[in-house]
Image (tube, rainbow, N blue to C red):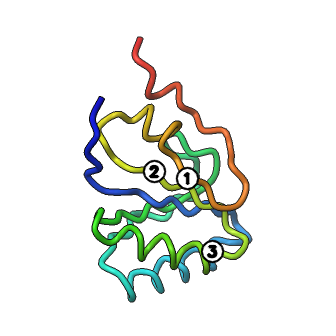
Amino acid sequence: MNTTVLDYHVHLYYDENSIEFAKDLAHRCEERFPIEIWRFHEKLVGPHPMWSVQLSVKTADFGRVFEWITLNHKHLIVFTHPNTGDDLLDHTDHAIWLGKSLDLNIDIFKKA
């Protein structure tokens, strides 16, 4: 089992009614912290059960970023996980949810 966190992903979940708020939130976060904003998906991607955008956060910055997201996400569901190299554990046992937690499609991480 890997015990090193390489970085974190913060996924903002949204729909057609909340995508503009998600974009604004991501860009306000980027103005405050050294994060990387990935693509705003308007379809399901990977294990995610809603449209989403990924924010990549360095381990050293995670506490401040997560604190800010916690206080500013309003109605958005936020799924956060570390990256340790074990995708299944990172998306299940190591996951943090803000708002409602959802079922992920973790079958993509299970070894055959």
Q: Amino acid at mark 1?
A: Ile
- Tell me the quadrant of the picture where the C terminus can be found: top left
Cα distance in 3D space between marks 3 and 2: 16 Å
Counting other residues with Cα less than 10 Å from the Cα at mark 3, is it few (<14), some (14-19), or many (20 or more)? some
Q: Residue at x 33, y 70 (%)?
A: 36
**Which residue ends up furthest to the front in the rendered image?**
3
Q: Amino acid at mark 3?
A: His
Say whether residue 2 is left or right of residue 88.
left
Q: Secondary structure at mark 1?
A: strand
Work out whether residue 49 or residue 68 is closer to the camera in this orientation and state it. Answer: 68
Q: Residue at x 39, y 81 (%)?
A: 30
**Residue under circle 3?**
73
**Residue under circle 1?**
96
Q: Secondary structure at mark 3?
A: loop
Proximity of marks 2 and 1: CB atoms separated by less than 8 Å: yes
Q: Secondary structure at mark 2?
A: strand
**Residue under circle 2?**
81
Cα distance in 3D space between marks 2 and 1: 6 Å
Say whether residue 73 is left or right of residue 67.
right
Q: Residue at x 53, y 31 (%)?
A: 106
* Residue 24 x, y percent position in the rendering: 55, 83
Cα distance in 3D space between marks 1 and 3: 14 Å
Proximity of marks 3 and 2: CB atoms separated by less than 8 Å: no
| Label located before the other in sequence (1 or 3) | 3
